[in-house]
């Protein structure tokens, strides 16, 4: 994927999620999820990458209005949070929502501007923006490289699964092969990879831990 085509894709993604926020507000539907129960379940899976009781830092790629930060506050004693999103409207909403949290910051970007202990990405691979499977896969792999480079201890991400019921699969969404991505993560990023595909949603979460 060329630089220009990637920028065009990111612009489409930003417009799509800006529209969802305008339509549904700061809610799971505002970031294109069906409801709060599923959103919280996804956060539980992603946060399994965090394996410390000590203070840590985290990059949230595709942060939306910062719902993951809300989820983390009562569960972790001390952490520095950076939310990254390509939608200016999302970042503005997140900054307003979390303005009293001194250890949370938000930036308009497609990748982190710092290396954190952990990075997560939720839902950023789902809506393919009319791209073919091969083009979207190239984009997804480039974003995984970005997650890897921004993470000192590990990263986690989720995808819709190719094991979804065929009659419920939508042509505008991307359904990833979890086995292929598990193999890619094992070969490219770390020997310590966990595939979570047992939490009742039509998706999976990948946990990549780095050897320290």
Image (tube, rainbow, N blue to C red):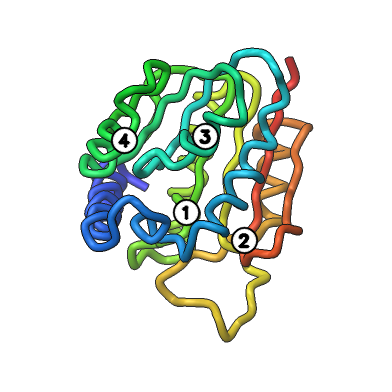
Q: Is mark 1 on a helix, strand or loop?
A: loop
Residue 54 vs residue 84: left or right?
right
Say whether disc 3 or disc 4 marks the residue closer to the N-terminus: 4
Q: Distance between the residues labelled 2 and 3?
A: 21 Å
Count of residue discs: 4
Residue 142 vs residue 164: left or right?
left
Is the residue under label 2 in contact with that under label 1 (CB below 8 Å)? no
Say whether disc 2 or disc 3 marks the residue closer to the N-terminus: 3
Q: Distance between the residues labelled 4 and 2?
A: 28 Å
Residue 2 is situated, as x and y percent measured from the top left of the image, at 32, 44
Is the residue under label 2 in contact with that under label 4 (CB below 8 Å)? no
Is the residue under label 3 in contact with that under label 1 (CB below 8 Å)? no
Q: How far apart are marks 1 and 4 (CA)?
A: 25 Å
Is the residue under label 4 in contact with that under label 1 (CB below 8 Å)? no
Q: Is mark 3 on a helix, strand or loop?
A: helix
134, above or below 194, in the image: below
Q: Distance between the residues labelled 3 and 4?
A: 30 Å
Say whether disc 4 or disc 2 marks the residue closer to the N-terminus: 4
Q: Distance between the residues labelled 1 and 3?
A: 14 Å
Q: Residue at x 66, y 45 (%)?
A: 45
Judging depth in this view, the residue of 133 and 212 nearest the camera is 212
Q: Nearer the viewer, mark 1 or mark 3?
A: 1
Q: Residue 97 carries which label?
A: 4
For label 1, the residue is: 125
For label 2, the residue is: 203
Q: What element carries label 2?
A: strand
Q: Which mark is residue 145?
A: 3
Q: Residue at x 24, y 62 (%)?
A: 23
């Amino acid at each position: 994927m060329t630089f220009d085509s990637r920028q065009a894709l990111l612009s489409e993604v930003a417009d799509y999620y800006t529209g969802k926020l305008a339509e549904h507000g700061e809610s799971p539907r505002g970031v294109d999820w069906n409801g709060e129960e599923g959103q919280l379940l996804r956060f539980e899976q992603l946060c399994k990458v965090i394996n410390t009781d000590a203070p840590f830092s985290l990059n949230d790629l595709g942060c939306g209005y910062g719902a993951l930060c809300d989820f983390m506050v009562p569960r972790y004693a001390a952490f520095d949070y950076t939310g990254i999103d390509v939608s200016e409207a999302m970042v503005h909403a997140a900054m307003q929502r979390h303005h009293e949290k001194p250890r949370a910051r938000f930036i308009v970007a497609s990748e982190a501007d710092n290396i954190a202990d952990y990075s997560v990405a939720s839902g950023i691979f789902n809506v393919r923006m009319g791209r073919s499977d091969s083009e979207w896969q190239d984009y997804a792999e480039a974003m995984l490289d970005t997650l890897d480079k921004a993470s000192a201890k590990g990263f986690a991400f989720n995808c819709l699964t190719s094991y979804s019921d065929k009659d419920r699969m939508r042509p505008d969404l991307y359904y990833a092969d979890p086995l292929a991505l598990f193999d890619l993560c094992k070969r490219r990023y770390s020997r310590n990879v966990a595939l979570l595909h047992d939490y009742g949603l039509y998706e999976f979460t990948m946990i990549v831990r780095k050897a320290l």
